[in-house]
Amino acid sequence: MSYEAPHKAVILARGLGSRMRKEAEGVALSEEQSKAADAGVKAMISVGRPFLDHVISALADAGFTDICLVIGPEHDMIREYYDNVAKERITVSYAIQEEPLGTANAVLAAEEFAGDDRVLVINSDNYYPAEALELLADVPGSALVGFTRNGMLTKSNIAPDRIAAFALATADAEGNLDELVEKPSQETIERLGDDAVISMNCWLCTPAIFAAAKAIPMSARGEYEITDAVRRAIEDGDPYKVVKADAGVLDMSNRGDIASVVEALGDREARL
């Protein structure tokens, strides 16, 4: 089946924000930042304006103009803001994930939004640069944007020890996802070699992801994981192209990340 260039994005914003809720020694926040941090709503941390505005602005720069925010029933802060903020380039809709049952379960909440189209699925607490997202424009089916180790080390705000713990992906001879290893050991890192890329959960999915998400079992930590759904989709005949991006991703996981995100974004304008 052929698809038009992707233009729909699903942003997973249902997370509980446990790490963001924790106080961090030596980190001073503004009243506005503290309110969002205390609520665990990482995407709404102010970096001049909500962090999620920058995430969405980069999506729009890359041609993703139909945005679906997967939120919890209690996330009034997000809904109230995006219902009222001026939007010139994008439309915003919502999908409710009733319980925090994992990323694959969150994707299922957006099935109606996706319809027969492909959707980009990303985290709400990561800023993916437009130049990485633009690489998906010519991909015919499903894909993973894999970030080079050098790009992550030099262009992100994430410490090297944290980067070393991120999932690694390799491609087969056709360029499709072959191996995906989460929390790789040093031995595995060496085995996979320099061609392995880092997965930051930036997935372009055909509608096959929904059947896969319904078919997978719950993981050992009690959640339905998007990585398991992707593996199931591949097994069922929907290959994922590995698209290599020599770029970095900004991370907004805890209070200690806020200052480095502000510095990295600089005076970058967010246009919705």
Image: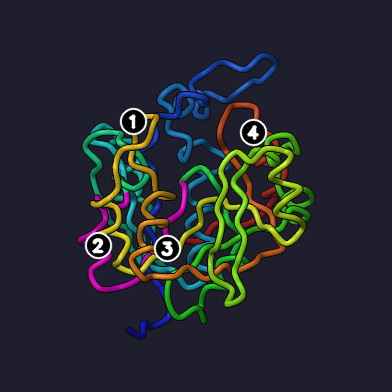
Across and down, in percent, residue 151 comes to 74, 56
Q: Residues within 10 Å of mark 1 (few under 14, many from 20)?
A: few
Residue with the mark numbered 4: 257
Question: Which residue is located at x 42 percent, y 63 percent?
Answer: 120
Q: Which one is earlier in the sequence, the residue at label 2 or at label 3?
A: 2
Residue with the mark numbered 3: 120
Across and down, in percent, residue 61 comes to 54, 69
Q: Nearer the viewer, mark 1 or mark 4?
A: 1
Question: Which residue is located at x 51 percent, y 51 percent?
Answer: 201
Q: Distance between the Cα atoms at labels 2 and 3?
A: 12 Å
Please state the extent of the stretch shown in magenta in the rendering. Answer: 107-123
Dot 4 falls on a residue whose secondary structure is helix
Dot 3 falls on a residue whose secondary structure is strand
> Mark 4 belongs to which amino acid?
Asp
Residue with the mark numbered 1: 222
Left or right: residue 270 compared with residue 266: left
Question: Which residue is located at x 44 percent, y 70 percent?
Answer: 239
Residue 83 magenta-drawn? no
Q: Distance between the Cα atoms at labels 4 and 3?
A: 25 Å
Residue with the mark numbered 2: 113
Q: Distance between the Cα atoms at labels 4 and 2?
A: 32 Å
Task: Name the foreground residue: 272 vs 153.
Answer: 153
Q: Which one is earlier in the sequence, the residue at label 4 or at label 2?
A: 2
Task: Name the image quarter holding residue 220.
Answer: top left
> Mark 1 belongs to which amino acid?
Gly
